[in-house]
Image (tube, rainbow, N blue to C red):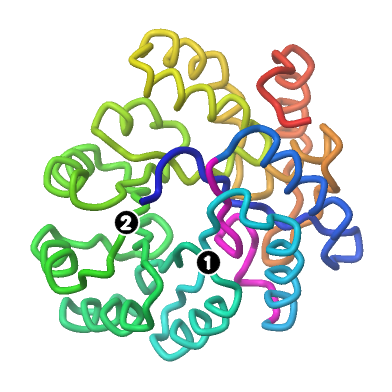
Amino acid sequence: MFQGVFTALATPMCPSGTVDYVALEKLLQAQIAAGVNGLVLLGTTAEAATLSAEEKQEILKFCMNKIRNRVKVIIGTGTNATATTLENTRAAQAFGPDGVLVVTPYYNKPNPDGLVEHYRQVAALGTPVIMYHIPGRTGLKVPAAVLDRLVNEVPQLAGIKESDYDMAHVTDTAVKYADRLSYLCGNDDLFPQYLALNASGIISAAANVLAPAFVQIYKLFAQGKTKQSFDLFAKAYPLIKACYLETNPTCVKYMMSKIGFGGETVRLPLGKISAENKQKIDALLQTADKSLFIH
């Protein structure tokens, strides 16, 4: 159901911290022109945790009016409170998304029964659910037995965005479920490995800047041109790694600012990236193949 490249869209902001809708529209149009298959709105890269409910509604209304069904849309609705997640999902449903991205509850580390019930209640609202598994941010690594329960007891679970760096876990999960649901790479720097494990695509933060590269990497692999796909990935790899020199989306936004897509402003508790990392990124941008970037 969810195949190809999905950009986890950043939220451009003015120096004052308000949403920069001019830059947001430019970013939306550039992403669609680059050939992405979908967009993820209000995810981690969007700094959704720092957006008010009113801002989220405004962003969704603005984006959906510009997207006009040209690509699939996934909306991030997950929190560490089931009631709030349900509220967010109902609000998102008003915009008719193709799916909702629901992170495993962070900080409170739910037990197996609680986790299954959390997803069961969200899925009961009717919109396909993609579970976002990112142990490095949530502190919760879903055990294999619990994942089995989720897949078997929550039939509306349409996909998994996998951001675990434990490749043994990733391999086990892909072997069991990649033919049953959309198994989406959540680690930009491991995209070739995920493709080799039958992932259906990627949800990418780096694609805010490098959408043309990710689209071509995916297309070449799908066409059986695995060597050319990897060669292109290797070409983009230093830039992909640079997107994560500091906490996402700080470096992504700095790169976006350097290629003409808004400013580098992020909201606290995120801060500007260091001068040293800016210099590293500047050096990469000066010598990079411009065809890798949105324009």
- In the rendered view, tell whether residue 234 sits above or below residue 168: above
Is 6 magenta? The answer is no
Location of residue 153 by image quarter: bottom left
Residue farthest front in this picture: 69
Q: Which region of the structure is painted magenta?
A: 37-52
Left or right of 152? Residue 118 is right
Quadrant position of residue 278: top right
Local crowd size for mark 1, using a 10 Å CA cut-off: few (<14), some (14–19), many (≥20):
many
Q: Secondary structure at mark 1?
A: loop
Neighbours of disc 2 within 10 Å: few (<14), some (14-19), many (20+)? many
The relative height of residue 60 versus residue 277 in the rendered view (above or below) is below
User: On the image, numbered disc 1 is attached to which residue?
Assistant: 97
Earlier residue among tags 2 and 1: 1
What x and y, as percent, mark residue 17?
A: 84, 66
Looking at the rendered structure, the secondary structure element under dot 2 is strand
Q: Tag on residue 159? A: 2
